[in-house]
Amino acid sequence: MLNRLFPDAIIATAADAECLGLNAVSDGTETVSVEWIRPQEAVNLGAAGERVVLFPTRLNLQMLAQAGSVEEAIDAAKARTIVTVSPRMVTRPDGKFLVIPPEAGYGPAEEPAGRVRVS
């Protein structure tokens, strides 16, 4: 097990026309950039190397992207049991992998250790 926590909160909410004109602002420390995009777009940008999307964030975005609407995403989040995720490092013949246990609800979730960024 890694001695590292991945505090990762994703906030899902419906944005009405009044909200769409608001500017998202980062704090410059924990969050260094902010933009309003759909979850799957963020996953795609990370996969293309156009954005840095950390492993735990990507897992949450992939889960959100499964919903067909904001309402479905919110309903799924309300129904989900929140568990503490304790990733573990697994060594196999093809290398080291960071593995998230299945009970966390992400399905098969692992990342080659060389690609994991923790800060």
Image: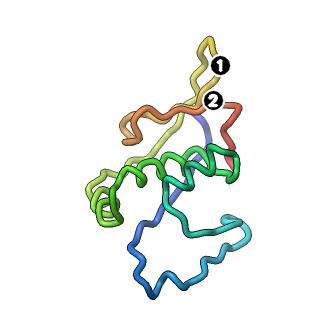
Residue 42 or residue 25, whichever sits in front: 42
Q: Is residue 104 above or below residue 8?
A: above
Element type at mark 2: strand
Mark 1: few, some, or many residues within 10 Å (few <14, many ≥20)?
A: few
Q: How many numbered markers are drawn?
A: 2
- Across and down, in percent, residue 49 comes to 70, 46
- Across and down, in percent, residue 116 comes to 66, 39
The alpha-carbon separation of the residues under discs 1 and 2 comes to 7 Å
Q: Amino acid at mark 1?
A: Gly
From the image, tell me which residue sits under label 2.
112
* Residue 47, quarter of the rendered image: top right
- C-beta proximity under 8 Å, tags 1 and 2: yes
Residue 95 - label = 1
Q: Amino acid at mark 2?
A: Pro
The residue drawn where x is 33% and y is 63% is 74
Task: Give the colour scheme shown.
Answer: rainbow
